[in-house]
Image (spheres, helix red, strand yellow):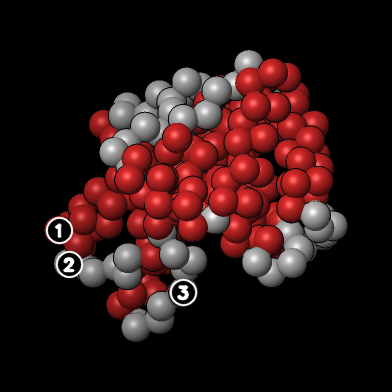
Amino acid sequence: MTGLQDQLPYETNSNLVLTLADHISFAIERSRRGIYVRMPAIYELEMNYPLETEIGRKFVAAIRRTFKVKLPKGEIQGIAMHFINARDRSLEENGSALEDHFEEILEQTTRIIEETMGLCVRRDTFNYARFATHLRYLLQRVFEEKHIDSSNIRMYLSIQEEYPRVSACVDEIARHYQDSWSIELTEEEKLYLIMHINRVCSKESI
């Protein structure tokens, strides 16, 4: 595991080895018994945590080679989450600029959505929790200067045209981030914000 862990740009919790070994042991046992635990879609996790997802993928491949057990694709996410959780606990213990200000940024972002989209955001729903999680991942990348910046400019322009009101909302959020926090969002990051905000607004509440 050390070789894979060295690919990550942060230290992990000392309990990671034990919790991960326990998870893999049960995953192998479930697979051999034909018991499969349904996992959420891996796309969003891969978008936000590509390194951890790739490590999860390598673990699943290594388990297949070593133990002759084919784990379901969802176990990639399960293993990746162990690394993510180990890192997050460390960040909370050490403190960070994001942890210090996230709740404030989240509330400011939510109010901008309410004002520009003309709706009342419910903060006690699953959709809002999912939105908040996405925003935390996005801001974490920005604070660590690991921006997403791929070749999706055509998709961004297309989404802008398809959802002009949501796009204007995201532009307002981006301006606020720049003015208040010196946070600059790339077009790729704006694209994903548009998609997430559109998803929650289409349900009339976040």
Give residue 123's quadrant in the image: bottom right
Give residue 147's quadrant in the image: top left
- Sequence-first tag of 3 and 2: 3
Where disc 1 sits, the SS reads helix
The correct choice, above or below, for 8 with respect to 50 in the image is above
Q: Amino acid at mark 1?
A: Arg
In this image, 24 relative to 70: left or right?
Answer: right
Q: Is residue 181 visible?
A: yes
Q: Give the number of callouts.
A: 3
- The residue under label 3 is 38
Residue 138, image x, y percentages: 54, 37
Q: Quadrant of the N terminus?
A: top left
Q: Nearer the viewer, residue 125 or 25?
A: 125
Query: Real-space Cα distance between discs 3 and 1?
Result: 23 Å
In this image, 179 relative to 31: left or right?
Answer: right
- The residue under label 2 is 68
